[in-house]
Image (cartoon, helix red, strand yellow):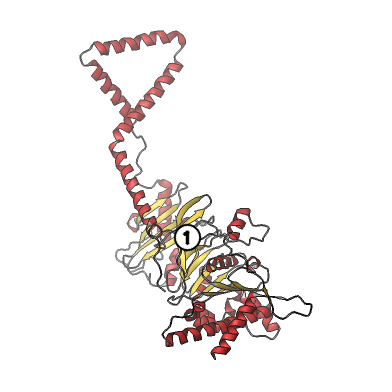
Amino acid sequence: MARRPLPRILSSGSASITRSREFARTAADNATDVLHPLITITRGLRMLAATGRQKWAATPKDRRGPTLSVVAACVLACALMPYGGLIALVTVMGAAAWAGRDRTPAKTGPDEAETARLRSLYEALVPYFSVADDPGPLFSHGGDWEKAFSGYEFDADGRVTRLQVTYPAYFTDSEAASRARIEQLLHAKSGRGREYHFAWDEEGNRLVMSVLGALPTSIGAQRFVTAPGETVLGFTDGDAVQRTVPVHDGDATRDASPVVWRTGARSTEPHLLVIGQPGSGTTTLLRSIALQALQHGDILIVEGSGTGEYAFLTGRDGVLAVECGPAGALATLEWAAHETERRLLATNRARQSGRPAPQDTRRPLWILLDRPSTLAHLAAADGGPDPQELLQVPLRHGRAANVVVVLSDQFDALGTLGETVRTHCRARVVLGHCSREQAESVLGAEPHTTPAPDVPPGRGYARLGTAPVLRLQVPATPDPYDEATGEAQRQAVLGLLPERQAPVEAAVPDGTGVPEPVPPRAVTAAVAVEGLAVGD
């Protein structure tokens, strides 16, 4: 099916707004340059008028009469003199220009405290950027730091916010351990409590360290402007991605930079793995993904913790099952494996006969599995199979069958994940406070930023396949049934939920004369199993 392009206002709106802002800023700067003399004279006249009022208020009442007489005589003399009015006007304009001039001295370099801080950073880098047999060392004890630091910026407190370092060509910047030592040193010497970004230019032998601002935590659950097959995992820095989407941030609407995860038959990262600490927001991310997936597909939710974090989705259109117990979870995952096989068979037969794939195989099926390690422990205690074994078919063949798997667990259960999960879940997310080594163990690469000192819920890193590691802030998607949830966030989540399903009644009564309601998962599973039987 060909995808219709997004409306022009959605695809190019942010670019036109950016150009308009740049044009307005340029016009304002040019107008300020042209009108600078008039602005200076106006400011000077205002200052002269204020000084005159102060002098008049300070003049005693018995001297105000003679003062007025002197002023009147001066005015009369100027009026009677040849060119007196012009001379008076020029004199007043000159005095106003002198009084309204900019007296702020231009800062041409760092002050004494900033120089001492730069000198300290330079001396700390000497052991790492110098060797004994260098005839002309760039870094040496007591050397010139201005040659090594080609650019620097400070904040109001005198701390470094940006530093550009030029280092010798023989420094082993291609080794991760060498870069990590320099980054750790600059992080400690520049001041902890902030998040730093390090950009290495191996070709030019330059390192740029900059302080990153906090990611916004006020963006909540909402309908994002995305195409089918695109899911917004969260938001990142503006210069990290080349796309923006309009979002509601409080009472205002602005453009934000999203981390978009693409799924489907042509996706190279068809499945997602989320790892985090307790309370880091992994469940929040799964709730956000579930609300977005319900726009174009069906979802199965298996909750290993059993705390009822997804109970608000029960009985909604598109929600096939929400399972918390081991028996129901295993049955649901077994049905998902059979459904994946059925989709593969139906799609293959349709292609062999020259027909398009059936409609039910083109609708995405999402399997959201939260805390599979807990389910594995309970299943092992009952002598049942590991739930990860039932995920092998959806993980290996899910992309061709339009089946998406999302797993979420904690760091202490990272070693229990099977090889199939690690191989096919190429989209990775790490949430919560973690070291760079922990982030690398999940993402496969170290982030180019230092760990954040204060980590709000939903804050972490994301990496899609072999793409760079991005900072991530998950949109706030709390449980609407939780008493601690605010009313605005509760209504935002409830407004995204589809309508409730009509109850399905069984054909065979249970002996009481009243038919029993059949859960949607059982009906769908029965249809899928029957389709497999007929097809075979």
Identity of the residue drawn at 36% across and 8% down: 69
Q: Is disc 1 placed on a helix, strand or loop?
A: helix
Q: Which residue is mark 1?
A: 187
Q: Quadrant of the N terminus?
A: bottom left
> Does residue 263 appear left or right of residue 140 in this picture?
right
> Image height check: is 35 above or below 511?
above
**Badge 1 local density, few (<14 within 10 Å), some, or many (20+)?**
many
**Measured from the top left, where is residue 193 in percent x and y?**
52, 56
> Image height check: is 444 above or below 22?
below
Q: Quadrant of the C terminus?
A: bottom right
Note whether residue 446 is visible. Answer: no
Note whether residue 4 is visible. Answer: yes
> Does residue 89 appear left or right of residue 328 in this picture?
left
Identity of the residue drawn at 40% across and 66% down: 128
Report the amino acid beneath label 1.
His
> Does residue 408 appear left or right of residue 359 in this picture?
right
User: 390 and 508: which one is in front?
Assistant: 508
User: 200 and 316: which one is in front?
Assistant: 316
**Measured from the top left, where is residue 55 in percent x and y?**
42, 18
- Residue 29 position by quadrant: top left
User: 139 and 346: which one is in front?
Assistant: 346
- Residue 142 position by quadrant: bottom left
**Measured from the top left, where is residue 342 in percent x and y?**
54, 84
